[in-house]
Amino acid sequence: MSKQLDLLQGTLDMLILKAISLSPLHGYGILLRIQQISNKRLEIQQGSLYPALYRLEHHGWITSEWGESENNRRARYYRLTSTGKRQLQAETERWNEMTAVIAGILQATPEQL
Amino acid sequence: MSWWTRVRSWTKSTVRSTRMERDMDEEMRFHVEAHATELMKRGMTREKALRQARLEFGGLETAKAQCRDAVGVSFLETLMQDLRHSVRGMLRTPVFALTAVIVLALGIGATTAIFSVVDAVLLRPLAYRDSGRLVTILMSGTGPVSVANYIDWRDQSRSFSTMGAAVFWSPNLTGVDSPEHITGLKVTQNLFPMLGIEPMLGRLFLEGEDKDGADREVILSHRLWQRRFSSDPAVLGKPIVLDGNAFVIVGVMPPEFQFAPFWATKAELWVPNAFGARIHSRGGNSLRIFARLKDGVSLTQARAEIASITARLEQQFPGTNRNVVVTPLKEKVVGSIETPLLVLLAAVGFVLLITCANVAHMLLARAATRQKEIAVRAALGARRGRLIRQFLTESILLGGVGGALGLLLAVLGTRALIALSPANIPRVQTALDLGLYLRCRPPP
């Protein structure tokens, strides 16, 4: 396993939206899901997860309700709302565009100019 | 983010802020414990696993504070905080707070009381339809008129859509449990339609009901109906005896109806006025004339016309038509009281200005002594807007308390003014109507 990468500023929201778009999750579950998909290559400050969740809920992109966890404990599950779905789509598109542009710039060779 | 989401989030965080705290706590604890369980599966002791989990989570309180920030401290919470702070500040400087509140209360109270009276007496239109077009026609502007003159004016003038007359009449009400002397008016049939008033019950007088022999109907005031007929809705058609003659009740007026507005103001019943033999009489002046200007006719035009008609009649019947004056009804009602009341209003207006200046100075002086406090708060990270907000909240608190106390004083003051006012100030009784503070209904 290679060294963990620091999360790029402003991308946590997008990752959270993506994680819970697959299925409703509690906070810890979101952390595990992101780590699992990324092969633990992303370093996520666990405490920073919650302010992000509250912010997203405040925006109306996700909602939450209390439910039972796998080991029968009360846990708060987050779910994507329809505006959240749109938001995720918009952010994904923007991200793809951004990475394409940046990749293009980084791959530029003298001949192209 | 739509405003609705914003509001919902606000209310959520305000109304349920204790719940939010509980939720946050439970949620983060769950996280730490779930992570610890995970770590224990890798062979750590429970104690060690918990410590490790907490370490990896980072500062719990910092995370919570960030959550609160994310939702935003609610408007109400900040307001409560500022109010609490303001109250504490006032209690620390009770002399200042008390002085400011009393000064404000006196200023606001005096102004409001006087304004209530001015509003009731001067500003509110008379409670008749399009009352600005109503005039009175009287001898020398005050005296009554003879029947024959009224009929001539009515028939010869073109400036008025209607001209009606009323005469004072104070009959004995008998035939009920206790006889009573009642103030009333005999009115021509066209008078009430001219005022544009609808009865609360029953009907107005019909055409022909002010002819001789047909004039045996009576319309009651709301007060008389309550007082003598216990608000009986079946009162219509019942007979009552006035001065020994039987009358039939045909209508009851609404509670706010008052006629006439400047004389016989306490009239409680109205009957039709049949002129009988007096139709040719140019003596025995008893009628007060009320008229409505025709659309498009100015007061000056009406005055000119009445002047020419009366000049002609005066030649025909010397000594009967001298100095006939057309006065707008409002002016007749308000009359000589207008200027003194306006002067008084201007005076208390200045009192309010002085009050404001005083309190402003007091606040300024106080702010000067609080520079240290302000500096500390600024140094602790309070932004400019936040400081201004705090001071505004304090001022609003002062103004609110002063205003509330002032309103109380205003009600008492208005009562006192009504009690003290000479009997000839019209309409002052209505100054306490709550409508005065919250008037939003269109004028009748």
Image (cartoon, coloured by chain):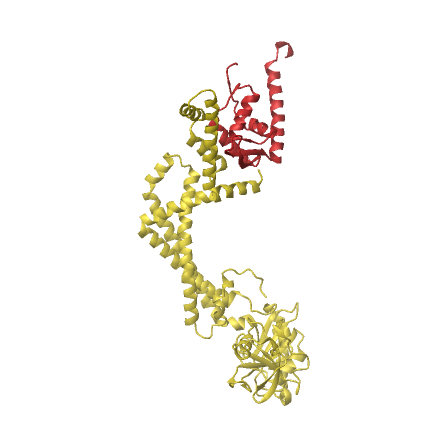
Closer to us: B52 or B85:
B52
Residue A10 appears in view: no
Q: Position of residue B339 (x, y in %)?
A: 47, 67
Give the residue displayed 51% in from the left and 60% down from the top.
Answer: B438
State which quarter of the image contains the C terminus of chain A.
top right
Q: Position of residue A104 (x, y in %)?
A: 62, 16
Q: Is residue B333 above or below residue B245?
A: above
Colour in which chain A is drawn: red
Q: Position of residue B355 (x, y in %)?
A: 39, 55
Residue A35 falls left or right of residue B341: right
Closer to us: B41 or B55:
B41
Q: Is residue B347 above or below residue A50?
A: below
Give the residue displayed 36% in from the left and 39% down from the top.
Answer: B374
Q: Residue furthest top?
A: A111
Q: Is residue B157 above or below residue B81?
A: below
Closer to us: A69 or A37:
A69
> Chain in yellow?
B
- The quarter of the picture where residue B165 lies is bottom right
Q: Is residue B50 above or below residue B135?
A: above
Residue B92 appears in view: yes
How many tags in the picture? 0
Closer to us: B29 or B63:
B29
- The quarter of the picture where residue A112 lies is top right
Q: Position of residue A70 (x, y in %)?
A: 53, 30
